[in-house]
Amino acid sequence: MVARNDNVTTFNAFVLVENKMLGNDRIIELLKGLTKEAKGKGAGQAEALYAGNHGSVARFANSSVIQNVRESDRRIYFRVLLDKRLGITSTNSLHTEDLRRCIKKATAIAKQSKPLKFFDSLPEPSKYPDFKTHFSETANFTISDKIKMLDDIFRKNKSQAPSPKSQIKAGGAFSTVETEIGVVNTNGIEAYQPFTSANINLITSFPSMSGFASQFERNIKNINTDKLVSTAAEKVSECQSVRVSGKRKLKPGRYTVLLEPAAVNEILEWLIYIGFGAMSYIDGTSFMSGNMGKKIMDRKLTMYDDGADLCGFPVPFDFEGVEKKRLYIIKNGVAKGIAYDTLLAKKWRRKTTGHALIPEDIEGPFPTNVFIKEGDNAIDDMVSTVERGILVTRFHYVNGLLDTKTASMTGMTRDGTFYIEDGEIKYPVDDMRFTDSMLEAFSRVREISRERQAFPTPWSDVGASIVPALLIEEFNFSG
């Protein structure tokens, strides 16, 4: 709570209740009081960011829940701007004295910092679209509800076994999270948004074979357990249907490859990290550096970031309260744009694109709501067009730092890798290592699926990537 008189701002410590949201009014009131006090203590401009989340994750193996973990975290970040000197601090305590101490420290840091000649102001107010991003069904989903849903998945998974004696097991993780973000600064920004999310990763395993499926939703009601189980089990059943004993080994070489959405997402995460942020672009390590306006991928490919696109997981503003708008990163294969926050935008005489992360994230900004534009093809139809090739369900252990200027990466296939011949899946193959430049590989895209899937982004608690499947020619498997 915040109480005021004409000359003094005082704070009453919050009584925190585990797993309870503070809500719009309490957070904005608190942050406004903090920024007012910071200015009263000598700050030229001040910003307070509240980021709070709580949730739980259930991990399961051998069709049994083996662990359930609950976690709550609330943190307030301060930025103080004084004569172009910036001070940044944070605290996970909402007690009065801790908050005051943090404000005082931020001001002291600003006074001792080297002036940033280019940074003359925090962001100005924006108008934000009204999105529904919080669903009570997800927020009120209990641990008991989660276990019931997992038991249902285990039963359905068992029913997919090719015979009663078959040992088909389910493993993976099921998480639900409730998040709220609030930003206030002395220029007039007041922004608040609550979020919920539910994410299931399911691995169906059979002796020597496994399959994978996942689903990421804001509303837990949209989780489709039938589809999850059937998608993961399909990989195993495909192995059984072709009546082969175990997996076969393929020789290294270049193959036509069908990357399903989970595999594409692994590559996209690395493209974002090494190439789509202003930091790597400015220091020249990004594959986008020196290529703006040039064709660097196949013209079928368009990638953009859009926190306002209702086809994804909408987010109205970034972590400094700047409205999110569409940013084309790759358009028809041509490099078009990168993500800026206010600090880097001012330094390089650009406009912020609304991609600030939390102040302590020294590697940002990054796009957090990336879409790869859909194509016209069903994934099954894409398989039928392949004369000889490989279907990849997903990758793991991907290393995208081999050569960031060419987006060269290496990694392994996992949980469903199949040889395709004459438009049909013929047999499962041993997991393979790929090593290739993604600029070159993504310049050989033959088809893009119209189906797309959502995946959580590692750069933000509230972001998501929306990706299709890609059919790529001459993809290099090195081992």
Image (cartoon, rainbow, N blue to C red):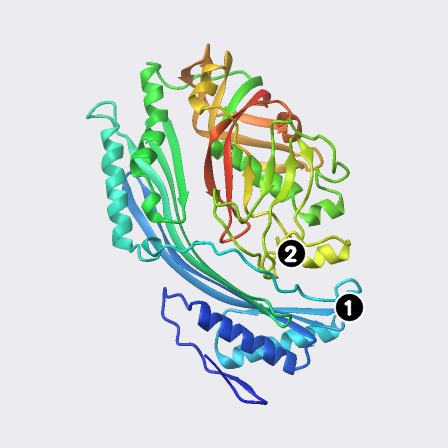
Of 382 and 395, the residue lying toward us = 382
Coordinates of residue 99 in the picture (x, y in percent)? 54, 77
**Mark 1 and mark 2: Cα distance apart in space:** 17 Å
Q: Quadrant of residue 381?
A: top left
> In the rendered structure, which amino acid carries the disc numbered 1?
Lys
- The spot of residue 196 in percent (x, y) is 41, 54
Q: Position of residue 41 (x, y in %)?
A: 65, 82
Q: Which residue is found at the position 67% from the left and 73% from the top?
A: 45
Give the labeled residue for mark 2. Answer: 362
Q: Which residue is mark 1?
A: 114
* Residue 397 appearing in the image: no
Image side of residue 374 versus residue 343, left or right: left
Kind of element beneath mark 1 = loop
Q: Earlier in the sequence, mark 1 or mark 2?
A: 1
Looking at the picture, which amino acid does disc 2 mark?
Ile
- Give the left or right position of residue 447, taking residue 153 as reference: right
Quarter of the N terminus within the rendering: bottom left
x 65%, y 35%: residue: 331
